[in-house]
Amino acid sequence: MIDFPPKDYIQTKSAVPGIAIYMPKPPEETHQEVVEFHCPQCDGVSAYSADNGGLTCTFCGYYEPPQQEVVGKHAEAFEFTVETMERVAHGWGTERKELVCNRCAARTTFSTDMLTHTCPFCGSNQVVQVKAPQDVLRPRFLIPFTVTAEECRKKTAVWLQDSWMLPAELSQLANKARYTPIYIPYWTFDATTQAKWRAEVAHQTVRQVYVNGRWQSRTQTEWRRESGKAVVEFDDLLVTGSQYLSQHLLRQVQNYDVAALVPYDASFLAGIQAQAYDVDLDAAWEKGRRAMRTKTKAACKGQATSRQMRNFSMDLAFKDENWRYILMPLYLATYPYGSETYQVLINGQTGMIAGSRPADWKKVLLATAGMMLPAILLGLLTLVLANVPGMDSDYVPLVGSFAAFAFIVGLIVAIITVTQAARMDDV
């Protein structure tokens, strides 16, 4: 009698209820317990260098060039199928430790030879080290670091003094801040959306009507039914896999060039921290679909003959959906000022910088008072002139109107200034 299921076969998902489907058991992947990168000259520890894109010995400086080729937009993408999820690799391909922050709950991984006791997200020392899990999907591609920590320091120093509203001593903190290189998880999605839409679109018509013995022009709104079709292609839509970074700041530094993608290799993570995704594929794809739906809806509305419409509806279909799990280079830095801790993000490929900065409210309030000073002086002058005997009565209203105008302008500029200052530390 033949055993069923056959040896080395496992049950997989069936599209027909009541029908069992079996497939060959995928080969078990063994994870190397430790992969250390040692210098071939002095046996010292090597780490990835953003200066030259290879492994550099931290002791003797020996340089080992990279062995990877750039694949860019030709990087392999995966379909949303059960078979795909069963055959993708898991883990990091090397043993790594995981740092769990007790303050912000962020999790990062780092090489076993690294000695780190600080959370790169919030700067807290309240961290716990554990063994990094190997059950997460392994990234297939990444963009290597090309910006160095020294370049980050220079960019931050300029950024911390590019506004008069900032404290004067703030730029000095750029040299004291620690710039932690870390690979951030990202999902990229490709898809094509096909939409059919319909709506009632407003059209303005001018008609002549006879009222009270004369003709008058009247504008009327006429609602006309319109419909159409839209096809929008999405290529490498980025959705972050990290929930512990400010999405507001992350979007400002997200100008990555995916044409620089290279196949993942553990050597790129030598001496560099990395974060595994905490936003899984399903949640990321839902975010991606919402973004695609919003853009497709805008494309449909753009086909209408008028922007004013009502009863809009859209039938949307997705096709050719693919995904990738990749790592993106990012520098994180935190610096204390007063009783607060501020965060800086720098793109490890392009050098784009964003972050939160404290405003010097003494400067802001003095500047605001200076903006209102002309209106106050003109107002006082108006009062003085109004009480001067024999003063021409035409001068008083004129000066008063200047005072009112100066007050309105000063108030508007003051409100804009205070709003800009308040947004500096907006995360």
Image: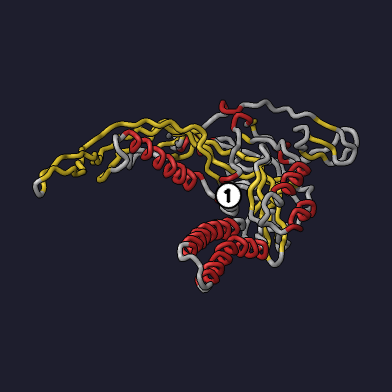
Q: x, y (%) of residue 270?
A: 75, 41
Q: x, y (%) of residue 282?
A: 47, 45
Image quadrant assignment for residue 191: top left
Image quadrant assignment for residue 306: top left
Q: At x 53% / y 69%, what residue is drawn?
A: 385
Q: x, y (%) of residue 390?
A: 50, 70
Give the left or right position of residue 380, taking residue 60 as reference. Answer: left
Q: Nearer the viewer, residue 101 or 124?
A: 124
Task: State whether residue 173 is above or below residue 228.
Answer: below
The residue singled out by tag 1 in the image is 242
Image quadrant assignment for residue 421: bottom right
Amino acid residing under circle 1: Ser
Farthest left residue in view: 213
Q: At x 67% / y 45%, what residue is drawn?
A: 346
Residue 100 shows up from this direction: no
Q: At x 72% / y 44%, what residue is drawn?
A: 155
Around disc 1, counting alpha carbons within 10 Å, would you say few (fewer than 14), some (14 to 19), or many (20 or more)? Answer: many
Q: x, y (%) of residue 185?
A: 60, 44
Residue 378 shows up from this direction: yes
Q: Where is the C terminus found, in terms of image quarters?
A: bottom right
Give the left or right position of residue 113, taking residue 96 as reference. Answer: right
Task: State whether residue 253 is above or below residue 258.
Answer: below
Q: At x 75% / y 33%, what residue is drawn?
A: 53
Q: Where is the N terminus found, in terms of image quarters?
A: top left
Q: Nearer the viewer, residue 395 or 315?
A: 395
For mark 1, give the secondary structure: loop
